[in-house]
Image (cartoon, rainbow, N blue to C red):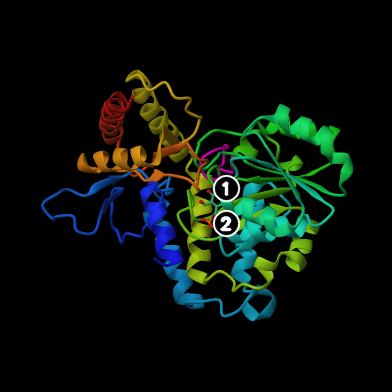
Amino acid sequence: MDGLTCWLNERKAAGNLRELMPIQRIPGGRIRLPGMPESLPPLLDFSSNDYLALTLHQSVIENSRRFLDSFGAGSGAARLMSGDLEIHHHLEAEVARFKGKESALLFGAGYLANTGVIPALAGRGDVIFSDRLNHASIYDGCLLSGARLIRFRHNNLNHLEECLEKHRGNFQQALVVVESIYSMDGDRCPLKRLIELKSCYSFILMVDEAHATGVFGRSGGGVIEEDGVADHVDISMGTFGKALGSYGAYVAASEEMVRYLVNRARTFIYSTALPPAVIGASLAAISVVREDRKMRSALHKKATLFKKILQQAGLNQDFGPSQIVPLLVRDSNVALEFAADLRKKGIFATPVRPPTVPRGTARLRFSVTLHHSDQVIIDTADVVAEVYNRLMLEKN
Ligand SMILES: Cc1ncc(COP(=O)(O)O)c(C=O)c1O
């Protein structure tokens, strides 16, 4: 058996093999998996990050189409070649306003933003303090940077302070990176306390708001807006591909920082600019999010309802304050079984397993979206709780 086969077989045996599966998306937050008999109703999709259902919002689609017709299918080149269109600047100005910062810079995706910005800010001789549960794109950015990486315990600012106390003095620049809402745990970073640490230890603060933008804050500007800390966050990163229903990413920062990143962030410099249809969709999405506050409160109500039913059914896991609801089962094969049982009952939730999450913390990650009515949320939570409780009883 050659090395690849061996590796794949080992992954499969551990329940950690990832496989692609072309799904069919159906309006109303439903999907069909390959090979599903037509007689069966489509599955309810509880794995999407389309929290506000903006992928199907009429004005988002119309503006995307208008930009496609007016400006063409692609931007033709990287921004620093001839791909720097006026529409990119327009979106950057809107993002800066949305995030309460002076300026903004677009990236091809969140992965590219994190792997470009972090190495631009820290290198050999510097130190990065990164939450242990930060997204892979942040981790990869840290590794690429060549800086000393210190991972502090998840959401534990006492531990971060200990690390700062011990190590900060030994390095030139320091960067602290966190997510405001953690992608696989749904919990929230205590940003206000983190800002207090900034006045004691000098560091650049970068906050990834991939799962908070559009969902938190009075105008949807994220936890940074809700906590009123935009002025203290040096780099506010976010994506268009989740609550904003489109694609791509941005960082919002000072004008000087953005000018610096234009010259230093390699994933910005050496990559084709975002296409017009995506810019059109993102512009419309920001405008919807800013104007329609009811969307946000409706989403939070649904998320609270979902969590409340799970808790009433005896699932006393520590749920965070967000639309992301993880149910830990720990073992990867149990997570696969849990997902398979739910599919039989019409619910699709992806099992999240190592290496996406730490070993021994496999889970099903449910995300609540506006695609689903309150009744669907209630019925789903009932089924999820029943299947989870049965599975736990069998396994323990
Ligand atoms: C916290 C976080 N940051 C960054 C990313 C990457 O964003 P994108 O999907 O736009 O590459 C993700 C995507 O899942 C994420 O969850």
Is 207 left or right of 384, judged from the image as shown?
A: right
Quarter of the image where the C terminus is located = top left
Which quadrant holds residue 193? top right
Residue 74, compared with residue 5, is above or below; it is: below
The amino acid on which the numbered mark 1 sits, given as a three-letter code, is: His
Residue 89 image position (x, y, % from top left):
65, 66
In space, the residues marked 2 and 1 are separated at their CA atoms by: 10 Å
- Is the CB atom of the residue marked by disc 2 within 8 angstroms of ligand 1's nearest atom? yes
**Residue at 80 percent of width and 36 percent of height:** 164
Q: Residue furthest front?
A: 1
The amino acid on which the numbered mark 2 sits, given as a three-letter code, is: Gly
**Residue at 38 percent of width and 21 percent of height:** 311
The residue tagged with tag 2: helix, strand or loop?
helix
The residue tagged with tag 1: helix, strand or loop?
loop
Report the residue marked by disc 2. 110
Residue 53 image position (x, y, % from top left):
39, 48
Q: Is residue 297 visible?
A: yes
Is 16 left or right of 87, judged from the image as shown?
A: left
Which callout, 2 or 1, points at the residue further toward the start of the chain?
Answer: 2
| Mark 1: few/some/many CA within 10 Å (<14, 14-19, 20+) | many
Q: Is residue 297 magenta?
A: no
| Mark drawn on residue 135 | 1
Which quadrant holds residue 154? top right
Q: Which residues are magenta?
A: 213-222
Q: Is residue 17 visible?
A: no
Residue 79 image position (x, y, % from top left):
65, 73
